[in-house]
């Protein structure tokens, strides 16, 4: 297993040495459940940031440390001013890091670029079908949500009726 703390410190130092001002990161987490992403940066209500890194990056020996650093830096760059999206400032900072250190930081990285197989996503099956009793319009949902639990409170956007029939697809 790779040394998470050492990689975190190296990524933070590389960014600071490149002259890039980062935001206030209050927590780092190794995410053992993440299956379709390498990392995530969340902005908290108070303006601080929480970063998650997939445990796969740290435990899979096929993934080189440089690839882990690229993901960590990718997420840290989201803490910079006006950098939550993958454009504008974030892209500018990623370009600086790529030129300065020879990294390959970009918006999306496939598994094959990190030395492992690519994730094969399976489309989610439709789980719920709602039919408006007023006009017959149908709404399809793949997962449970506020709407699927409280559909009787919602009006149809086409006819305004507040009458739905719910069908669960098995």
Image (cartoon, helix red, strand yellow):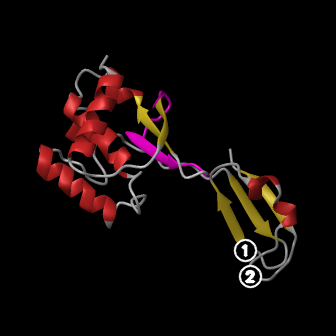
Specify the segment rendered in magenta: 30-45
- Does the rendering let one see residue 118? no
User: For residue 118, what is the image quadrant?
Assistant: top left
Residue at the (24%, 28%) spot, across then down: 63
Where is residue 36? Give x, y as percent.
42, 41
Locate residue 73 relative to residue 102 in the image: left or right: right
Dot 2 and dot 1 residues touching (CB under 8 Å): yes
Residue 163 position within the rendered picture, expressed as x and y whole percent measured from the top left: 87, 69
Question: Helix or strand or loop: what does disc 2 sit on?
Answer: loop
Q: Does residue 34 show up magenta in the picture?
A: yes
Compared across the picture, whether 15 is left or right of 157 comes to left
Q: Is residue 72 left or right of residue 105?
A: right
| Residue at point 29%, 28% (across, down) | 7
Q: Residue furthest bottom?
A: 159
Disc number for residue 137 = 1
**Image coordinates for residue 58, horizontal then vertical, percent:** 33, 24
Report which quarter residue 122 is drawn in: top left
| Res. 154 in view | yes
* Closer to us: 62 or 46: 46
Quarter of the image for the N terminus: give it. Answer: top left
Q: What numbered label is drawn on residue 115?
A: none
Q: Is residue 120 above or below residue 168?
A: above
What residue did someone put label 2 on? 158
């Amino acid at each position: 297993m790779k040394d998470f703390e050492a990689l975190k410190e190296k990524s933070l130092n590389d960014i600071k040495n490149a002259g890039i001002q980062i935001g206030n990161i209050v927590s780092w987490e190794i995410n053992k459940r993440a299956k379709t992403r390498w990392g995530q940066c969340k902005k908290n209500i108070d303006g601080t940031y929480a970063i998650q890194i997939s445990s796969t990056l740290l435990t899979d020996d096929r993934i080189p440390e440089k690839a882990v650093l690229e993901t960590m830096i990718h997420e840290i760059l989201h803490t910079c001013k006006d950098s939550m999206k993958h454009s504008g400032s974030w892209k500018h900072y990623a370009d600086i890091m790529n030129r300065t250190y020879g990294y390959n930081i970009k918006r999306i990285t496939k598994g094959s670029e990190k030395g492992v197989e690519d994730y094969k996503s399976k489309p989610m099956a439709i789980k719920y079908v709602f039919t408006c009793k007023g006009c017959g319009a149908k709404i399809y949902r793949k997962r449970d949500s506020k709407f699927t639990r409280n559909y009787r409170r919602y009006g149809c956007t086409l006819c305004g009726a507040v009458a739905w029939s719910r069908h669960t697809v098995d």
